[in-house]
Every structure is written in structure tokens, then in C-alpha cells.
Image (tube, coloured by chain):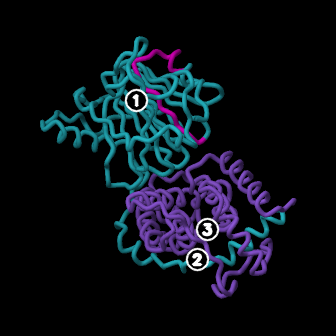
Chain colours: A purple, B cyan
Amino acid sequence: MEDRPLEDDELVARAQRGDTRAFGTLVEEHQTIAFRTAYLLTGSAADAEDAVQDAFVKAYSALGRFRPGAPFRPWLLAIVANEARNRRRSAGRRERLALRAAEDPLSGGAVPSPEAALLDAERREELLRAVDDLREDDRMAIGCRYFLGLSEEETAAALGWRRGTVKSRTSRALDRLRDRLGVTA
Amino acid sequence: MTELERALVGLGAQLDLPETPDVTAAVLRRIPEAPARRRFPARRALVLAFVVLAVAIGAVMAVPPARTAVLEFFGLQGATVRRVDTLPAVPRTSATVLELGKPVSSASLDPFLVPAALGPPDAVYRSSAIPGGKVSLVYRPGPDVPRSLYTGVGILVTEFRGDLDPEYIQKFVGSGTGVEQLDVDGSPALWIEGEPHLVLFLTPDGGRREDLIRLAGNTLLVQRGDILVRIEGEIDRDRAVAIAESLGPP
């Protein structure tokens, strides 16, 4: 929401009046973060796609009860995460998401944010292994906050935690990573 | 940001994630022409309640006028209470079914709260039917808690994220039911006591209704931060407030 409050507000208001094109724009703008969140939770691209599609359909039906002026993204991510978790449960799978670093880091066209530190291959693998070894809660906190770039509020919505819990688990996860990597910072 | 945090952001940008499929067209094909609108939700819900109840008990009911006037309105984040001039006669038997979700261990309750005053719950249920989920804590009847005619248990505590679903609970009360606005430890609350009232739990996905409409007994609604807590049982106001004051992390 921080980046474009007016646009989301306006699109939601139009969609609430039955403007499906406005809703289509909301889908286009938020489907990437929705898909990545669902992928983080399910570990399966196919499940994530189904979850995202169903979540947008449910979100549209629920728009009448969306609180005006509230940020759209956390609300949407809560619905997406719910769908994603249902799928993982119903499939009876508890597999861990296997994170892999891309062969050529910039091949996906991803533009790293100015805050991102570009890592050499060795350091990347070491960090990835350390994250992979974390317990589930910690991995999810790190995944949402740093890999997906979600805010604390959005992470709370996606994981169904309180904001204070997001804060404390993230800091616990960072401490564990530091221990493992022997970093003092 | 620390060096480690910057490294994690960098790693995130270099992860091999599957490409995002474009679901826009598929979603637009599936959504109905008009979404659930905010206009007159109460009246529509009430009419729906009558229809469902009539079907449920297999009898033609004398349906009160659909234009039942809303005489008073009380709102919390997650729940609304409307005083109406005509409340439908709901048979008490309709209250025997509680859709609580799946039983879970109380270890998985975060971010929800547990009332220390009641001790550990006898059963815990979690449902993912609404954004953020819903938990229900069930306490058996005991020496100081009679069995509720409406829930069949002693005390029922229901919690959900009121900020994500601002009108999940809708209540309708008639003239024989008192509604009192309270402050419980700085949190806004509503105490509903007297004649049984009508409660509707709505699902976020519009037309699909899997929740129930039933009569409810004395109830305290408390808005604790983002969590809306509903405490129902044959208890008095002071007891309900004491239970609410003891709510804390599991």
C-alpha cells in the first residue's frame, strides 16, 4: 500500500461497484506477489497457481465486506495464504520448499533492490543452506520478509500471525542465521 | 538493515522461482457480473436467515416483514449488532449444530488468545473458512457453568481476525434483549443479555454459505486489537468480563 495507495483504493472502489475491468487491473498488479507467497507456502507451482486463482475469485465475492481505506495487499494475501494452506493440507503433503539459487542470478529479469547485496556463488550457497536448515516458522518469516519483501503487516496476514510475533520470530531467525554463519553483525 | 538482512534480500532476488502464471483472464471468466455489495447487508442476511431456517425445519414459517426496521446499531471490528423490531421465531433445535472446523491442539493457536480464568479448554477447533482463520475454544458444563441451551456446551469462545473480515458476525436482537457497551481493559466490548438473539456467521466468499444461523444466549463481544473474541454461555456479565480480562497469548 505504501507505494500506490490511491490507485488500489480507487480500483477497489470501482470493483465494488461491479467494474470487473478494475478488478482485472488489481489481479494483474498483485498476482506476482500473490503467486510467490502461495509458492512459498505450498512448494508447488501448480498448487500455487490454483490457490491464487481461487483466492482472487473469493476476494472479488468478498469485496462488499472489504473495509474502505484499508490496505488491499495484506487482505488479499490472507485470502491467498488460506487457499494455499488448504491445498497443502488437502494434498496431504508436508514437503519443504527446496530453495535454489538461479544459475545466472539476473537471468529472470529480476531487478535487485538497492538494498540487496549481490552475493558470490559460494556465499549464496552457504546462506541458502543456512536458511534451509531453519525450522519452518523461521524459514517462513525470513521468506516473507526478505525473499518476498513483504511488510510486517503483510507477513502477519500471510502467515496468520500477530505483528509482534512476526517481529520476534524474524529476529529469532536472524539470530540463528548469525550463529550458524558466524556473523557478528 | 544489517549486512545479513541485505544479503538475504540479495539472495531473494537471485532465487530460482517459477515464473508467475497470468491468471487474470481465468479469474475474470469465473467472477460473477456483480460482487456482493455493501448496500443493505443486514436486510439481505436476515431474509436469507428466514429462508434457510424455513427450509431447515421443513415448515412454512410466517415470515415477518422483510423491511424490519433497524432501531439501533452497535459495531465492533468483526461484529455488528442490530436491534430490529421483529425477530423471527427460531426453534431452539436449530442451535444444536455448531460448525467449528477441525479439532487441533492448543499449541497451534497463535495469534489467538486464551482466557486464563477458564483454565485449559476441553477442546479446540480451527477453521480456515475466513481470512486469518477462526478458532473455537470449548469448555464443558461444570458446577459453576450450566449447559447452554443454544450451544450444548458450557462456554464457547470464538475468535477471528476482525480487521480482515469486519462483518463476519452479524447479530440481531429484539426488544427483550439488552445490549450494553463496555470497556474491558481498554478494549471496546458489547454485552448482550436477556432473550436469546439471532447470530449469523458469514463467509467471505459471497454466495457460498457454509456457516450457520442460530439463536444465542448471553454473549460478550470484545475487540482485542485485531482479534474479535466472542464469549457465549449461561453466565452473568461480571463473569464474562472477568473471562475477557484474563485473555492472553496461549
- Most foreground residue, B134 or B206: B134
Do the numbered discs 1 and 2 sit on residues whose CB atoms are within 8 Å?
no
Alpha carbon distance from label 1 to label 2: 52 Å
Residue range corresponding to the magenta coloring? B226-241
Q: Is residue A129 above or below residue A179?
A: below
| Residue under numbered circle 3 | A7
Q: Which residue is drawn at 47% across and 60% down?
A: A94
Q: In this view, does B185 lie to the left or right of B8?
A: left
Q: What residue type is labelled 1?
A: Arg
- Most foreground residue, B110 or B66: B110
Number of the front mark, 3 or 2 = 2
Q: Answer whether residue B71 is magenta in the image.
A: no
Q: Is residue A104 above or below residue B145?
A: below
Q: What residue type is labelled 2?
A: Leu
Q: Quadrant of the C terminus of chain B?
A: top right
In terms of secondary structure, where does tag 3 sit? helix
Q: Position of residue B233 (x, y in %)?
A: 41, 22
The answer for which chain carries disc 3 is A
Q: Which amino acid does label 3 sit on?
A: Glu
On residue B17, which mark appears? 2
The answer for which chain carries disc 1 is B
Q: Which of marks 1 and 2 is nearer the N terminus?
A: 2
Number of disc labels: 3
